[in-house]
């Protein structure tokens, strides 16, 4: 079944009385070459367990299932579950899970499906698949929330190949000095190598969204790109700096709740001009600065308001 074909989508809508939900970000793919591009970009093979976020009517799921060992697809919309059981009936290597990806215990799901070794006492012990790869044409309304959840949970995953709004992809790829550089850029670049798979015009979806899309592959780094004394401090610096991005670092870092003199000392030790703004700092600059704060925390009592 050519699920990307608009007349097939209309047929399914009519048969099941299905209506697109704008609030769930339902823009279904209608372009075969884009689908093939995602599957090729994700480099899916029989050794892979694929986790798909938001299968819709199963368009991308079906293409992935042709190449993967197994596809597990998590879909929030209960109205689509029945449709998926029909459209994917021919594939015995697909499992559809009804649920919200933001509330799903992905770690557990991966282990249960054979993508990671389970501890003794959990039933199975050995993993069945070489790699776990995540794919999805993400609902725009929660793209960054999904990405950060997947990265922060440090899942046993090789890559995440996902379609997102072009503006979000541009932000993720941005470097220091760019207007679009922000906390999400530093965070994703800390966890992953980023590769652009394809640019996708809005005409490739039904219904047509207002914006174009980009498919990125995030290859999870095996070792972090910078040495950190305390990862939490690194992320606190990023949050404080970009939380007030128009302010100088001397002011925005007050959000860390160290005394002003301490902030000045740390910036000086990191050789960062206190008049600079967060958007000019590289990943390495943030790491050096965070390490200075981590060292200070060891030998200085914070003031009354401090959360350190
Ligand atoms: N994969 C299909 C395609 O490419 O045609 C559909 C993509 S559509 C942009 C996003 C899909 O994600 C929809 O099916 C929507 O119902 C689902 N979705 C939205 N929020 C979700 C969530 N929190 N957890 C799981 N699925 C979600």
Image (tube, grey):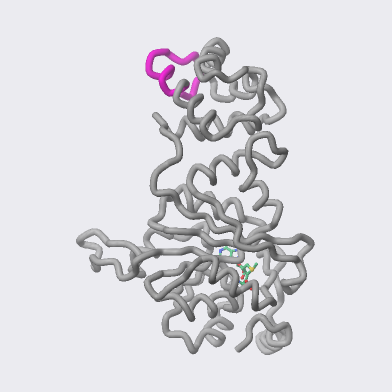
Q: Residue at x 64, y 59 (%)?
A: 164
Above or below 64: residue 275:
above
Residue at 60% of width from left, 70% of height from top?
Answer: 37
Q: Is residue 73 left or right of residue 79?
A: left
| Magenta-span inclusion, residue 181 | no
Where on the image, by quarter, is ligand 1?
bottom right
For this rendering, which residue is in front, 98 or 111? 111
Q: Residue furthest left?
A: 120
Question: In which quarter of the view is residue 122 placed?
Answer: bottom left
Q: Position of residue 134 (x, y in %)?
A: 49, 63
* In the image, residue 193 above or below residue 8: above
Q: Is residue 301 above or below residue 65?
A: above
Residue furthest out toward the right: 210
- Find residue 15 and report its horizontal and vertical position in percent: 67, 89
Question: For the point 43% across and 60% down, which residue is it?
Answer: 106
- Count of residue discs: 0
Q: Nearer the viewer, residue 13 or 293?
A: 293
- Along the horizontal axis of the image, is 118 left or right of 75? left
Q: Quadrant of residue 225?
A: top left
Determine if the magenta segment contains residue 300: yes
The residue shown at (46%, 77%) is 67
Quadrant showing the N terminus? bottom right
Q: Whole-percent x and y of residue 239?
A: 58, 34
Magenta extent: 293-308
> Which sits in the foreground, 150 or 270?
270
Residue 205 x %, y %: 72, 72
């Amino acid at each position: 079944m050519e699920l990307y074909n608009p007349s097939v989508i209309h047929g399914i809508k009519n048969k099941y009385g299905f209506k697109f939900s704008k609030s769930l970000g339902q823009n279904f793919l209608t372009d075969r070459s884009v689908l093939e591009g995602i599957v090729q970009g994700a480099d899916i093979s029989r050794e892979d367990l694929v986790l798909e976020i938001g299968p819709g009517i199963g368009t991308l799921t079906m293409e992935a299932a042709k190449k993967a060992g197994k596809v597990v697809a998590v879909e929030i919309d209960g109205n689509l579950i029945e449709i998926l059981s029909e459209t994917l009936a021919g594939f015995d290597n697909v499992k559809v899970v009804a649920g919200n990806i933001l509330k799903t215990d992905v770690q557990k799901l991966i282990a249960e499906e054979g993508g990671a070794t389970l501890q003794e006492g959990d039933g199975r012990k050995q993993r069945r698949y070489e790699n776990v790869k995540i794919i999805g044409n993400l609902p725009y309304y929660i793209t960054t929330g999904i990405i950060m959840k997947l990265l922060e949970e440090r899942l046993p995953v090789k890559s995440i190949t996902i379609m997102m709004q072009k503006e979000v992809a541009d932000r993720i790829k941005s470097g220091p000095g760019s207007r679009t550089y922000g906390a999400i850029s530093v965070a994703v670049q800390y966890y992953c190598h980023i590769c652009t798979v394809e640019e996708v015009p809005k005409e490739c979806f039904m219904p047509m969204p207002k914006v174009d899309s980009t498919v990125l592959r995030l290859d999870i780094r095996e070792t972090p790109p910078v040495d950190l004394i305390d990862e939490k401090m690194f992320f606190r610096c990023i949050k404080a700096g970009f939380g007030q991005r128009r302010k100088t670092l001397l002011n925005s870092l007050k959000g860390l709740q160290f005394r002003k003199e301490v902030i000045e000392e740390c910036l000086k030790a990191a050789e960062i001009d206190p008049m600079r703004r967060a958007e000019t700092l590289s990943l390495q600059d943030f790491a050096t600065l965070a390490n200075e704060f981590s060292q200070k925390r060891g030998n200085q009592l914070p003031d009354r308001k401090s959360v350190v």
